[in-house]
Image: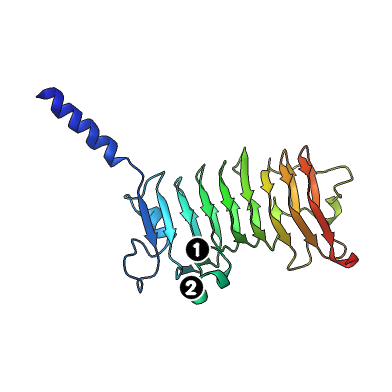
Amino acid sequence: MKKALLTFALLGAVASTQAKSWKIGPNSVTGMDFVSINAAMSSSNVNPGDTLYLDQYYSDNVKQVVNKKVVIIGTGYDTSLIDEGVVATLTDSLTLWADGIEVKSVKLNNVKFYADECTLDRCYANDIRIGTVPKGMNHIYSCYIIGQVGNQVLASSSITSISGATTNTYVNAQLDIQNCLLFYSSAQNRITNLTKSIINNNTIIVGSSYYQIINVDNSQITNNILYNTSSL
């Protein structure tokens, strides 16, 4: 009898730690668990390993901070492929503070990495920045990026091109960027201030007098298509 009770207790402990799924969306949509990512992060019911599904009508203009290792899944960013032409959108910044976070198919504004081994997959984003905490790699796969990717911008007097000597003395910023489209929406460089990174199979487009890749050292850079619109 004692053995049976112990078995049931162990099974109950395993069940209580199984990953759960949560729905994020406005109060106007029925069946939602939380109204924002921040609200989910504040809940003791949400644990590392859980998945947050963003409703297509979820829109947030307040900074969202993810401090648990969760998976966040949106509804894509191409409104022509979505019923009623609406997709989940974050118009302020998304800050990743826990190692191993995954963000998939979300329309984002600015993203800030303050952890390691986080992944953006099939997302739309403006600027993607590295904070002062990460010591390892973060990953960006199959994303459409209209801003700048990398560490903080260097003073113009410190900038050197990909073919010149680097002067990167900033935080050890590492990114794995693959199969992305980086298209300029303003006059600025695209991928900047990285080290020990992987930049493969991307299409990178910039305007006149700016660089596709700049101040990147000790990195693997292969099979990228580089355009400068001044030559088109």
Callout 1 amino acid: Thr
Q: Quadrant of the N terminus?
A: top left
Q: Assign the C terminus to one quadrant of the image.
A: bottom right
| Residue at the disc numbered 2 | 83
| Residue assigned mark 1 | 75
- Where residue 121 appears, as percent x and y from the top left, is 58, 52
Q: Residue at x 59, y 53 (%)?
A: 112
Give the x, y percent position of residue 47: 37, 46
Left or right: 160, with 16 as reference point: right
Q: Residue at x 11, y 24 (%)?
A: 2
Q: Residue at 71% across / 41% down in the picture?
A: 197
Q: Residue furthest left?
A: 1
The reply to whether residue 168 is visible in this rendering is no
Residue 13 picture location, percent across and down: 26, 35
The reply to whether discs 2 and 1 touch (Cβ–Cβ < 8 Å) is no
Along the polypeptide, which appears first: circle 2 or circle 1?
A: 1
Q: Position of residue 145 (x, y in %)?
A: 67, 60
- Residue 77 visible in rendering: yes
Give the number of marks: 2
Q: Amino acid at mark 2?
A: Asp
**Label 2 vs label 1, nearer the camera:** 2
Direction bottom: furthest residue = 84
Secondary structure, mark 2, is helix
Q: Quadrant of residue 176?
A: top right
Quadrant in the rendering for residue 188: bottom right
User: What is the distance, in whole Å, between disc 2 and disc 1 at their CAs?
Assistant: 10 Å
Task: Please report the residue visible at 22 percent of the width from the left and 37 percent of the height from the top.
Answer: 12
Q: Secondary structure at mark 1?
A: loop
Along the viewing direction, whichever of 148 and 31 lies nearer the viewer: 31
